[in-house]
Amino acid sequence: MIEGSRKAAEARSTNLFSPCRALGMLGVLLGISNAQAQEAEPRSYSNSPIGLNFLIAGSVYSDGKLAFDPTLSIADAKFHSTTGLLAYVRSFDFFGQSAKFDVIVPASSFGAQGVVNGQPREREMSGLGDPRFRVSVNLFGAPALSAKEFASYQQDLIVGVSLQVSAPLGQYDDTKLLNLGNNRWSLRPELGISKAWGPWIFEVAPSATFFTDNTDFFLGNNFAQAPIYAVQAHVLYTFQSGVWMALDGIYFSGGHTALNGVRNDNEQRNSRAGFTLALPIDRNNSLKLSASTGISTRTGSDFSAVGIAWQYRWGGGY
């Protein structure tokens, strides 16, 4: 009887899987634990003295709506999320050029609601998301310098690369359509170019994010996603006081999904814009404020976000 009930439930989930599949994609497209796919990061390739350590604690609040294929029976899909972030960054010497290693651990409180097949649905959850690890190496224009040597450094053109890996260690329940963890690995290689003209800095960074399959998606289904291609750009201005601000933009496309080998028509072509303001407090502490919003969304999440982060640095002669 128990086995028969399970098979009946799985049959019902298969019959209704077009809308359920779309809701299941929410955790991936929204980027609850992989926000790097939709959030721009200015100064990712800026030079810094070797041996510096950074401890960063922050919080981001976001809310918005979800855009699905019009053929799916989903309406009024909305969400809100509060994500706390704890990060550690270390700068080091890589064959004479500056490099950085960072790890980010997110924890989120998330809620979503919508109408599926005429029935209201909602989901509330909280817990840890997938941690992210990244190595960034500057190939040109950012030599490895001590704190004393860095005092006379002036940026011109910097070219760097990075690789970020997201590990499937976040909260995940295969009986739920929405999860904070994605139950799969992702890898994001990126090229970064930063050019300074006096107090102005112009940056561009194309990237691609590749995903392994989630082989235990909602009652044992196989969920696959094509790579997401993105390009972000920033215009920064640095004041003599050390305060800097940036206008940020990002465009990303791709990322169509497949369930058990059947491809979905849900390729993303989305764009976002925002700004960042960094305020040094003293030699070791600084504060960063950010805000962003969606400009255009084909499928996925169209949301606005505001964030605040505190940074403490030590070591490397500071």
Image: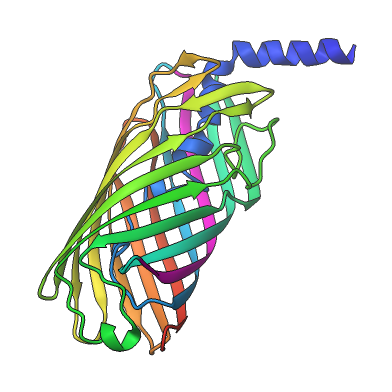
x, y (%) of residue 101? 45, 63
x, y (%) of residue 312? 47, 80
Q: Which quadrant would residue 270 be assigned to in this image?
A: top left
Q: Would you say the magenta stretch is mainly helix, strand or loop? A: strand
How many dots with numbers? 0
Side (left or right) of 308 relative to 260: left
The residue at the far front in this view is 95
- Quadrant holding the N terminus: top right
x, y (%) of residue 42? 29, 62
x, y (%) of residue 83? 53, 57
Q: Please tell me whether residue 108 belongs to the stretch shown in magenta.
A: no
The residue at the far left in this view is 197
Nearer-the-camera pick, 168 or 68: 168
Instruction: Establish if 42 lies above or below 80.
Output: below
Please report the bounds of the magenta region as a residue range: 72-94
Residue at x-position 41% and y-position 70%: 92
Nearer-the-camera pick, 14 or 252: 252
- Quadrant holding the C terminus: bottom left
Q: Please tell me whether residue 78 belongs to the stretch shown in magenta.
A: yes
Nearer-the-camera pick, 107 or 88: 88
Residue at x-position 29% and y-position 71%: 47
Nearer-the-camera pick, 143 or 152: 143
Q: Which quadrant would residue 220 be assigned to in this image?
A: top right
Residue at x-position 14% and y-position 75%: 199
Instruction: Establish if 31 lies above or below 87.
Output: above
Side (left or right) of 40 relative to 30: left
Residue at x-position 38% and y-position 86%: 281
Instruction: Establish if 217 lies above or below 264.
Output: below
Colouring scheme applied when the structure was drawn: rainbow
Q: Which quadrant would residue 123 be assigned to in this image?
A: top right
